[in-house]
């Protein structure tokens, strides 16, 4: 590894996840200014994917001459900058490589100006505005959650308890209801939206609330260690989520049924997942299990719903409201905006796949990333 350009190797590792790295040379320059070669030597002793205990890692480091002092000196930069995650797994402390999105989100949340912060904000903005189309995966890592009031009358069925037998998958489930999902977590952390933070740094801030990104349990613990997040109660979290709804933000949560890791509240003016959806990409977020339906007899064409929809799924055609189901996120914002009660939510005929848990979700995503890397090396294009 002595003769390798470790900064180039790091960028290639991140390209495994996102395809082409925007502003490649600028990003490499910022990496060189921010991290030492020893920092990256340490980084590349971590497994390509997955967790390694601190004790096992120290044995690996000793073999290549990295002392405990060098290790902890590197961690003082690598953890706050988002390159490395430190957490407990089955009661054992250890580390793993963090994905590129964590590096970007941590950098744009920094208070002090630096080359690294400026460049990562530009990289993040490029991803938001279209560079993410090179992402080599098909599986959405987020899914939309509908506004609770919009689905309360969708089914006469009661909520089904987690782990209960589900006779009809077309009922409202806890995985559809944000308040039920949050009751299952033990620790909640809140931080600034990294999409809107990036826009703010480059001078393109929107007017939507900034403190809207949630992390849960183990991931919340990691974020709280960085001082870029604060702990909130269930009650405060629900108040903030309601405020997000009144500002027209869309709830996006980890695309799994079990313990969720993240919950973002996205706008269509600054946030990457909604901008990607509106460009026709379907590999960043999945729609909710619901879709909007119209009672034409009650529609008075007030058009409040058109302004509320973040996906341009509603339009007027020959004096009638038209719904493009291919674009509908199933967020319920239009239903909340309709004063006449002409819009309601119904379960989709074919709901999108929701993974069993976060591990299953990311096993699938990493398998697709590996296939994408192979295809790129062979000069093949993604379908």
Image (tube, grey):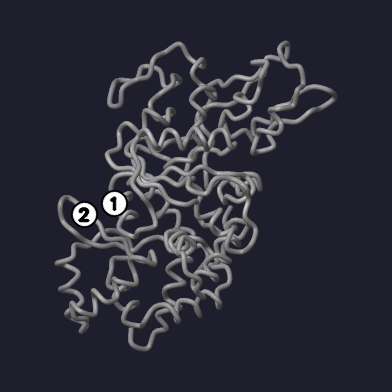
Can you give x and y, in whole percent of width and height, for residue 209 in the image?
54, 45
Q: Quadrant of the N terminus?
A: bottom left
Of the numbered discs in the image, which one, if any, rests on residue 327? none
Q: Position of residue 181 (x, y in %)?
A: 36, 32
Q: Who's the residue at 37% across and 88% down the image?
A: 3
Above or below — where is 178 with respect to 221? Answer: above
Badge 2 vs badge 1, beta-carbon distance below 8 Å: yes
State the mark number for residue 221.
1
| Residues at marks 2 and 1, CA–CA distance in whole angstroms | 10 Å
Number of disc labels? 2
Q: Give the class, few, some or many, for how many residues have Cα within 10 Å of label 1's Cα (few <14, many ≥20).
A: some
Q: Is residue 343 visible?
A: yes
Front residue of 205 and 374: 205
Q: Residue at x 54, y 54 (%)?
A: 195
Give the left or right position of residue 126, taking residue 143 as reference: right
Q: Nearer the viewer, residue 144 or 16?
A: 144
Query: On screen, 269 above or below 164?
Result: below
Q: Tell me residue 65's x, y (percent).
A: 20, 84
Which of the two discs, 2 and 1, sits closer to the camera? 1
Judging by the rendered image, the residue that carries numbered circle 2 is 88
Residue positioned 48% across, 39% down in the render: 143
Q: Residue furthest bottom?
A: 3
């Amino acid at each position: 590894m002595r003769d390798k350009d470790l900064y180039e190797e790091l960028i290639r590792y991140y390209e495994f996840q996102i395809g082409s790295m925007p502003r490649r040379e600028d990003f490499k320059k910022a990496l060189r200014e921010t991290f030492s070669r020893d920092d990256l030597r340490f980084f590349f002793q971590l497994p390509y994917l997955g967790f390694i205990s601190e004790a096992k890692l120290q044995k690996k480091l000793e073999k290549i001459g990295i002392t405990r002092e060098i290790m902890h000196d590197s961690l003082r930069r690598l953890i706050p900058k988002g390159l490395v995650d430190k957490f407990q797994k089955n009661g054992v402390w250890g580390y793993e490589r963090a994905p590129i999105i964590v590096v970007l989100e941590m950098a744009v949340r920094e208070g002090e100006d630096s080359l690294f912060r400026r460049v990562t904000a530009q990289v993040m903005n490029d991803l938001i505005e279209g560079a993410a189309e090179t992402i080599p995966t098909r599986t959405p890592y987020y899914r939309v959650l509908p506004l609770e009031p919009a689905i309360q009358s969708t089914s006469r069925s009661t909520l089904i308890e987690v782990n209960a037998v589900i006779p009809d998958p077309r009922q409202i489930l806890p995985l559809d209801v944000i308040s039920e999902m949050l009751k299952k977590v033990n620790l909640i952390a809140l931080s600034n939206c990294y999409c809107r933070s990036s826009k703010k740094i480059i001078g393109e801030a929107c007017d939507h609330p900034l403190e809207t990104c949630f992390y849960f349990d183990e991931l919340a613990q990691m974020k709280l260690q960085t001082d870029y997040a604060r702990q909130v109660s269930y009650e405060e979290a629900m108040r903030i989520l309601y405020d997000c709804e009144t500002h027209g933000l869309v709830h996006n949560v980890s695309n799994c049924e079990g313990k969720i890791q993240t919950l973002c509240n996205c706008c269509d003016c600054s946030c990457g997942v909604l901008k990607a959806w509106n460009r026709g990409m379907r590999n960043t977020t999945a729609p909710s299990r619901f879709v909007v339906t119209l009672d034409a007899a009650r529609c008075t064409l007030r058009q409040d719903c058109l302004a509320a929809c973040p996906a341009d799924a509603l339009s007027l055609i020959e004096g009638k409201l038209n719904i493009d189901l291919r674009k509908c996120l199933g967020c319920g914002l239009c239903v909340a905006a309709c004063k006449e009660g002409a819009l309601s939510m119904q379960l989709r005929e074919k709901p999108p796949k929701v993974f069993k848990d976060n591990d299953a979700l990311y096993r699938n995503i990493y398998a697709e990333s590996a296939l994408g890397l192979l295809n790129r090396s062979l000069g093949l294009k993604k379908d």
